[in-house]
Image (cartoon, grey):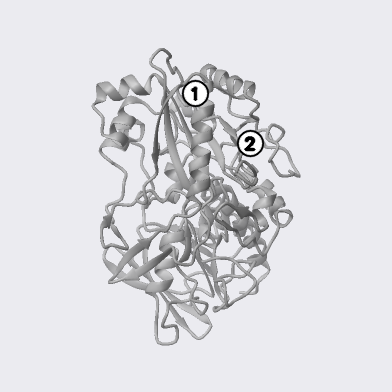
């Protein structure tokens, strides 16, 4: 007797969106989530609680390859990491699906093209209520439908920055965002980067994908359910071992979907090794855990002691003039986009400054980010050792990123913000984690096929950022959602 027709492990962007896609099929769908629903609280609006006291940060620890302990910002709540994400919902550019030459290497390309995913991008933008304008950015790929809502408006100080960038010949465009700005500001006068939302004002996996799925009576969500192991015999997953409140049980379904995120999905496959699958499940290619990517990200505080930043949310524009060119031989450099408004308590928590100094700098600064692609490297990987996640992240494409940071600093100086304080994101912030279970047509060099089914197992699908063959240089969330909708179409046709 099975516990469901389909078990989905994880309620983040991949798992929740897939559940929404499959819910109308009538199949009994059970979503397992190790965390609980995030209850509203004063801390959800308090930057000191979030950035100084790490109120919502999980207690779990990982290790880096040296054995040092990592305290990852990898959240265990219904909705996964999207509860705290910046809600930027960008499409990969059409060129990202093809091999692309960078300063320090060439990306492998995808087994599908942009045109294969485009209809699903359009559906994902509707599901996640994206606000944008596809006509402003020359690198924007073709859209079969307009964004469902107009862009989030620039605040006056950001409108001035937009004009200053445009005066330099840069093409400034609206960031596609999953934020209902009126509802968000009623909740609290803050930005939304790292601030969780329990009101539905931010389009996260819980408020959009999961809410849509749970409208159907055939879909159930089980919280507090930590999956510890997958059981397999031959080419089939036969059980899902779960711990709830310290009690173990084994759940069964004809079809199992793994959607726990790039790091934990690969770790679970490795932890599920058995005699038939000694290197871990779905790992006949020895690719599980490999090709871990997380973007090269540098946050920048551009300071001018004689100017004030009066914004509340700030995060509305981007520049992609260097996305496909800009290197010494025309190589791509990456994306530039606003950060959420950094206030004094946020800067004090992130940079360890006294609060008075942090407030002075934050209120006289613009806050912006440079993002460059992290190229796939088989030696950049996730291990499972001694019951722990071990992360060996080997950054790539750093020369291109350094050039992008220099371009951004120069643009900020010309825009009237002459002093720039720049800081890279640490490995303990796997915000854009991807790779580790890459999609591909060749079972010898990939983990899942173009429909996201594991090459080695007939009833296991992987639907999260781990399947991305490349990281591109944009936030991955919308691409994960589009892939989930595409996989949902396929799975709905598969006989149970």
Q: Is residue 213 above or below residue 268?
A: above
| Residue at the disc numbered 2 | 321
Q: Name the residue located 48 percent from the left edge and 49 percent from the top edge.
A: 398
Q: Give the image location of residue 323, x and y in percent.
A: 61, 42
Q: Disc 2, disc 1: CB below 8 Å?
A: no
Per the image, label 2 sits on a secondary structure element best described as loop
Q: Is residue 92 above or below residue 350?
A: below
Depth check: 114 or 461 in front?
114
Q: Give the image location of residue 87, x and y in percent.
A: 51, 40
Judge depth for marks 2 and 1 and give the one in front.
Answer: 1
Q: Residues within 10 Å of mark 1 (few under 14, many from 20)?
A: some
Depth check: 214 or 164 in front?
164
Residue 239 placement, left or right of 445: left
Taking the view exactly as shown, the residue that stands out farthest to the front is 328
Q: Give the image location of residue 378, x and y in percent.
A: 48, 67
Residue 160 in sight: yes
Q: Quadrant of residue 471?
A: bottom right
Q: Name the residue located 52 percent from the left edge and 32 percent from the top edge.
A: 408
Give the spatial CA distance, label 2 vs label 1.
17 Å
Depth check: 463 or 433 in front?
433
Q: Is residue 161 above or below residue 124?
A: above
Per the image, label 1 sits on a secondary structure element best described as helix
Q: Which mark is residue 431?
A: none
Residue 49 in sight: no
Q: Give the image location of residue 181, x and y in percent.
A: 53, 28
| Residue at the disc numbered 1 | 413
Total numbered labels? 2
Residue 346 placement, left or right of 411: left
Q: Name the residue located 36 percent from the left edge and 54 percent from the top edge.
A: 35
């Amino acid at each position: 007797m099975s516990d469901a027709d389909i078990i989905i492990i994880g309620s983040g962007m991949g798992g929740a969106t897939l559940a929404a896609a499959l819910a109308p099929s009538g199949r009994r769908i059970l979503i397992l989530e190790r965390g609980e629903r995030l209850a509203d609280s004063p801390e959800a609006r308090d930057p000191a609680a979030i950035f100084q006291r790490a109120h919502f940060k999980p207690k779990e620890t990982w290790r880096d390859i040296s054995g040092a302990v990592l305290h990852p910002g990898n959240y265990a709540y219904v909705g996964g990491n999207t509860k705290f994400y910046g809600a930027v919902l960008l499409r990969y550019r059409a060129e990202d699906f093809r091999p692309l030459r960078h300063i320090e290497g060439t990306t492998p390309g995808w087994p599908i093209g942009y045109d294969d995913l485009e209809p699903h991008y359009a559906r994902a933008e509707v599901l996640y209520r994206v606000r944008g304008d596809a006509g402003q950015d020359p690198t924007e790929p073709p859209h079969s439908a307009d964004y469902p809502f107009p862009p989030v408006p620039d605040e006056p100080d950001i409108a001035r920055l937009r004009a200053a960038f445009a005066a330099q010949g840069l093409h400034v465009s609206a960031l596609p965002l999953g934020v209902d700005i009126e509802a968000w500001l009623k909740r609290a006068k803050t930005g939304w980067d790292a601030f969780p939302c329990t009101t539905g004002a931010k389009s996260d996996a819980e408020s959009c994908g999961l809410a849509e799925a749970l409208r159907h009576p055939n879909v159930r969500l089980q919280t507090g359910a930590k999956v510890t192991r997958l059981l397999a015999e031959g080419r089939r997953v036969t059980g899902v071992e779960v711990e709830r409140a310290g009690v173990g049980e084994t759940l069964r379904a004809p079809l199992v979907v793994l959607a726990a995120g790039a790091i934990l999905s690969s770790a679970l496959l490795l932890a599920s090794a058995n005699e038939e699958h000694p290197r871990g499940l779905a790992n006949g290619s020895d690719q599980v855990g490999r090709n871990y990517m997380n973007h090269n990200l540098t946050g920048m505080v551009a300071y001018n002691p004689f100017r004030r930043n009066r914004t509340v949310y700030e995060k509305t524009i981007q520049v992609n003039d260097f996305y496909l060119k800009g290197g010494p031989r025309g190589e791509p450099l990456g994306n530039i986009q606003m950060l959420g408004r950094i206030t004094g308590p946020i800067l004090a928590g992130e940079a360890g400054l006294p609060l008075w100094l942090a407030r002075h700098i934050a209120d006289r600064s613009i806050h912006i980010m440079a993002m460059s692609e992290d190229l796939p490297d088989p030696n950049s990987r996730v291990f499972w050792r001694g019951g722990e996640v071990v992360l060996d992240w080997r950054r790539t494409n750093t020369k291109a990123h350094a050039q992008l940071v220099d371009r951004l600093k120069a643009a900020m100086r010309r825009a009237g913000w002459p002093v720039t304080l720049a800081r890279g994101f640490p490995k303990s912030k796997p915000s854009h984690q991807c790779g580790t279970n890459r999609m591909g047509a060749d079972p010898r060099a990939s983990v899942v096929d173009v429909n996201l089914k594991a090459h080695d197992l007939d009833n296991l699908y992987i639907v999260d950022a781990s399947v991305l063959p490349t990281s591109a240089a944009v936030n991955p969330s919308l691409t994960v959602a589009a892939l989930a909708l595409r996989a949902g179409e396929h799975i709905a046709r598969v006989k149970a």
